[in-house]
Image: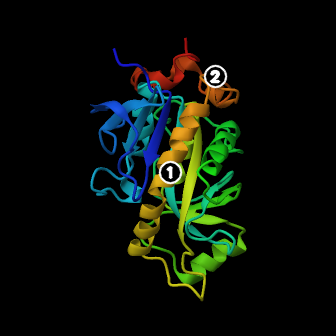
Amino acid sequence: MMDKPFLAVIGGSGLYSMNGLTDTLEVDADTPFGKPSAPIVVGTMAGRRVAFLARHGLGHHIMPTQVPYQANIYALKALGVERIISINACGSLRQEYAPGHILIPDQLFDHTHARHRTFFGEGLVAHIGIAEPFCPDLSTALERAVKETGATVHQGGSFIIIEGPRFSTRIESNTYRAWGMSIIGMTAAPEVFLAREAEMCYSIMAHVTDYDVWHIDKAPVSVEMMIRTLNQNTMIAQQAIQNLVKELTGTRNCTCENALATALITDPAVIPPETRKKVDLLVRKYLK
């Protein structure tokens, strides 16, 4: 029987594999919500089991809207993962967040409109608390791990998530700046919400690749610009994860692991059996 990975890394644009993993195996998972983006690679890092999942699939063939977010999070939960680090490419909406910098956001604005945002429905209602969307304990540990690499890292900031796949117009970019947003991306939502419903700690290492399109003195964002900066930052991301794996303990000191305790509102007697079965992995400790 495979030792369960205590941490998962979800790689975004430009990060499709994880160096430093040994004794690896691929898990071709299936879930009640379909198949994940790609086989999950589980390996050993610093003596501990870690999982890696390529969000956009091998070869980057899945658009942001079409990422199977529910399947990805469910599959990691089924493997026993308790903590998730998401690696995201992002555009900067602030002068002080320069390309090459890393930001660990503490707030998120979901500006998407065409995605499944919950595991629930079909006769079972849950209202998850998400005032603080990212696990503060995991984010603090991640900040220390990134700082150890020597990279420039910023703690805190608001991450706006747009539908994509197109980039913003200039007026959209400036509007998001006026709203007080710090960085912009396409994939953190609904991933962060699903992780909370699955009672998993979740934090983001956001790599600034560009100034979006608001900065009149800089070239507008392009795919080439994104990938060039991400390639430069790949070693930072991988070293930071190794630092984090060495630091994290097996005990969680946050409230993430009990997020559903006060979220389920439906009378268990009226939950359809097929729905209960579909989300049993998530709710079994609450629905006896």
Q: Residue furthest bottom?
A: 217
Give the answer, above or below, for where 148 lies relative to 286: below
Q: Quadrant of residue 59?
A: bottom left
Q: In this view of the protein, can residue 103 be seen by the observer?
A: yes
User: What kind of element bears circle 2?
Assistant: loop
- Residue type highlighted by circle 1: Ala
Which one is nearer the viewer's eye here, 179 or 153? 153
Percent from the top left, x then y, of residue 76? 43, 32
Q: Nearer the viewer, residue 177 or 142?
A: 142
Q: Position of residue 276 (x, y in %)?
A: 45, 22
Which circle marks residue 105 in the picture?
A: none
**What is the number of callouts on the image?**
2
Disc ID at residue 251: 2
* Residue 164: x %, y % from top left: 44, 66
Spot occupied by residue 161 in the image (x, y as percentages of width and height)? 55, 60
Q: Give the side of residue 249 with respect to residue 79, left or right.
A: right
Q: Residues within 10 Å of mark 2 (few under 14, many from 20)?
A: few
In the rendered view, would you say 232 is above or below 7? below
Write down the residue under mark 1. 237
Earlier-in-chain disc, 1 versus 2: 1
Q: Depth check: 216 or 144 in front?
A: 144
Q: Specify the quadrant that holds the C terminus.
A: top right
